[in-house]
Amino acid sequence: MANVRLRCISDSMRILLKRVQRYQLAGRALGFIKWVKCSIVAGYMAALKAQDYLFVGIQLIIGAVYGFCAFFVQHPQTWPFNQAGWLLIISGILFTGWAVWQIRHHITMFPTPKDHAQLITTGAFARVRHPIYSGILLIAFGGAWLAGSWVMMGLGVMLNALFYVKSNYEEKRLSAFFPEYPVYMQETGKFFPKLK
């Protein structure tokens, strides 16, 4: 009788052990799936960060070369042509300042929005989706005009092309982040107001 009881207990233990092993295996498989998912998400986020850093890096290089040229490559315009350069520079500073003030709590140099970002569609953003880029372009072209430098004008064109590509990437990210962004895109211009 004792052998029968031991055998029943032994069989019950084997069944229980197999179930535990199955659950452990399932748990390990689930853990592996979660790890793979987290790795894919982390890899995707790392790729986004790499692209973000690339855009900002190119922007800083163009800005540094532009700044160098501003000091060393100058053929100043005479009045009244220099007034146009100053008008563009001052307009760009004011427009950029206004836009930065509006998004001061959510601002980032990178195209990917912060987690707690909010879509702002008023003020400088009411007619233009990227007023900071617009202001920087006004400053760049105004400075190039004021200095009379074709090199600086070429750098302004390069900056414009970079901002165009960067803003396209940024708008894809913003559309994924804010469901109402595509409607906002249709109503506003990218760098300059849409003509109605």
Image (cartoon, rainbow, N blue to C red):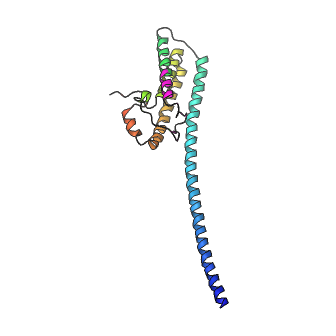
Question: Is 176 contained in the magenta span?
Answer: no
Q: Residue at x 59, y 25 (%)?
A: 65
Given residues 28 and 145, the one toward you in this image is 28
Quarter occupied by the C terminus: top left
Q: Main secondary structure of the magenta part?
A: loop
Residue 104 x/y as whole percent: 52, 30
Question: Is 98 contained in the magenta span?
Answer: yes
Q: Residue at x 54, y 15 (%)?
A: 147
Tell me the quarter of the picture where residue 22 sits. Answer: bottom right
Q: Which residues are magenta?
A: 94-116
Quarter occupied by the N terminus: bottom right
Given residues 151 and 125, the one toward you in this image is 125
Residue 162 x/y as whole percent: 51, 32
Whether residue 32 is situated above or below residue 77 in the rendered picture: below
Q: Residue furthest top?
A: 79
Q: Can residue 60 be seen from the camera position used here?
A: yes
Count of numbered marks: 0
Q: Residue at x 40, y 39 (%)?
A: 182
Q: Residue furthest bottom?
A: 1
Residue 165 x/y as whole percent: 48, 35
Q: Can residue 191 be seen from the camera position used here?
A: no
Q: Residue at x 46, y 28 (%)?
A: 131
Whether residue 124 is situated above or below residue 111 in the rendered picture: above
Residue 50 x/y as whole percent: 58, 41
Q: Residue furthest left?
A: 196
